[in-house]
Amino acid sequence: MNPAEPGARIHASDPFATPDRDKSAVRRLRGRLAAPVTLWTAPGPSGLTVSSMLVADGEPGRVLGLVDEESDFWDAVSVARRFAVTPLGTGDQQLADRFAGLMPAPGGLFALGDWIETEFGPVPAGAGTWAGCRLDGERPYGWALLVEATIQSINVDESPGAPLLHFRGKYRNLDR
């Protein structure tokens, strides 16, 4: 790969990553659990990559997630009281990194790509599946904020692509 290409790496590994021996046992356990990579967006617009989340089936369906309470995303959600959750696919690594603050975002987080405006927040134009959520509550949980929401609207792609997963500090897909 040419180092000038997008996504090219100079180092084979992250030179700033904390070595396993220096991580807490809880962090090491969490790293061994594959997690979905999702994009949470809110009116404002604002957004954040979230992998610590789950969907609870029921009437109504619910979403739970751990977010950074000091994030711009949380500031926007605490005012709007609503947000969108979009599962990301295997081609969305750079999008995930941009909204996680791991990649530069010249012009802002939403400057690149096409977006569809919804009452819950912007959704990537190519996203076939996403949920619109109403914030029900939040509380400190570990080093994060546990966000509880009710699903009010769902758009489901009938032929979804492979999901983007996070496992042991790297993006993965179901094939590797």
Image: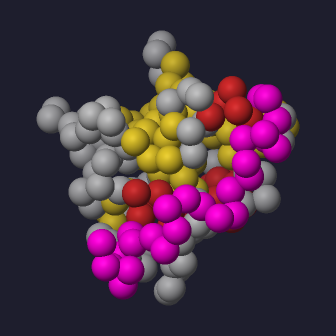
Percent across and percent down for residue 124 are 34, 59
Q: Is residue 166 visible?
A: yes
Q: Nearer the viewer, residue 135 or 102?
A: 102
Q: Nearer the viewer, residue 22 or 159?
A: 22
Is residue 129 positioned above or below 115 on the image?
above
Percent across and percent down for residue 63 are 55, 30
Main SS, magenta residues: loop
Task: Answer with left or right where residue 80 lies relative to residue 171.
Answer: right
Query: On the image, which quarter does residue 102 sit in?
Result: bottom right
Task: Answer with left or right where residue 90 lies relative to residue 75.
Answer: left
Q: How many marks?
A: 0
Location of the N terminus (image quadrant):
bottom left
Task: Answer with left or right where residue 170 lies relative to residue 77.
Answer: left
Q: Is residue 137 visible?
A: no
Q: Nearer the viewer, residue 43 or 139?
A: 139
Is residue 116 positioned above or below 36 on the image?
below
Percent across and percent down for residue 28 are 70, 32
Task: Answer with left or right where residue 108 lies relative to residue 153.
Answer: right
**At 27% from the left edge and 61% from the top edge, which residue is drawn?**
125
Percent across and percent down for residue 57 are 46, 16
Query: On the image, which quarter does residue 26 sit in?
Result: top right
**At 52% from the left edge and 68% from the top edge, which residue is drawn?**
11
Location of the C terminus (image quadrant):
top left
Q: Is residue 129 magenta?
A: no
Q: Is residue 6 magenta?
A: yes
**At 79% from the left edge and 29% from the top edge, which residue is drawn?**
25
Is residue 35 positioned above or below 169 on the image?
above
Query: On the image, which quarter does residue 2 sit in?
Result: bottom left
**At 47% from the left edge and 57% from the top edge, which residue is drawn?**
96
Which region is colored magenta? Answer: 1-26
